[in-house]
Image (cartoon, helix red, strand yellow):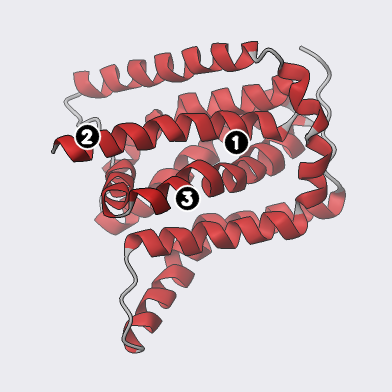
Amino acid sequence: MKEFTFPMKKREKIAGWIYLPVHMFLMPLFILPFIAIAAVRFGFAIDAVTLNVVYYAAGLVFVLIFMFPFLKKNVTSTWRCWPFKPWLIGFGIFYGGAILVNLILNFMGVGLINPNQEAVNDAVAMDTATMIAVAVIMAPIVEEVLFRGVVFGTIREKNRILAYAVSVILFSVYHLWASAVKAGDPTVLIYLGQYIPAGIVLAWIYERCGSIWASILFHMAANSLSVLVSSALGQIQ
């Protein structure tokens, strides 16, 4: 393993750690519901697709304002992965791990579509073009900067194993905690396992390539396939 380099400045780290709980908890729990309620009072109805756009647009604005130097510094090192052998290995682990987790869930008698994925599928069915922009462009940039850049990167400077553990756990919880709260059912958290392979692979690609853009592009590719499958299933149904 090559020595890990992390060009994020102190002020960027501080900004990232401050915004992380805002993005993970305050936005879904308070700000987005407030926006939806306020819109209704003014005679507008905001659907799930629009709320997704607002959510990730806010994150993207934060990234562009506070993390642009970090993104810029990472551009040139992206090509360290050429010809992208880590990506090929990553996809193998990503989908192999996903299949293994789903086999375990199936053995336990648990459905394979978790509430978060179901919500995404519904949103894709409502407005495929907009959700492509959200899932394939906006979400990967925001999530990679926060979970791989801020969380993994800052902890990785001190402890590699802890960096993997914390970033994977937060990334998994991030996708499901709101669904568990909304359903009032903590057993929903059993689906956390479905996000563990992705969290590990994305952190490994970032570490291996030394560029946040490598994990962003991988995340974009994985989400593209997911949206295409979701769209195809929606057409079949």
Q: Amino acid at mark 3?
A: Val
Give left or right: position of 114 versus 35.
Answer: left
In the rendered structure, the answer to whether residue 205 lies left or right of residue 231 reads: right
In the figure, residue 58 lies in which quadrant? bottom right
Residue to which mark 2 is pinned: 233
Q: CA distance from mark 2 to mark 3?
A: 19 Å
Residue 210 makes an appearance in the image: no
Among the two numbered marks 1 and 3 on one chain, the one whose residue lies closer to the N terminus: 3
If you read the primary sequence from the N terminus, does the residue marked by circle 2 or circle 1 appear first? 1
User: Marks 1 and 3, how far apart in space?
Assistant: 22 Å
Callout 3: few (<14), some (14-19), or many (20+) C-alpha neighbours within 10 Å?
Answer: many
Tell me how far mark 2 sits from mark 1, CA to CA. 31 Å
Residue 192 appears in which quarter of the rendering? Answer: top left
Residue at horizontal 85%, vertical 38%?
A: 7
Which mark identifies residue 146?
Answer: none
Q: Earlier in the sequence, mark 2 or mark 3?
A: 3
Which numbered disc covers residue 134? 3
The type of residue carrying mark 1 is: Ser
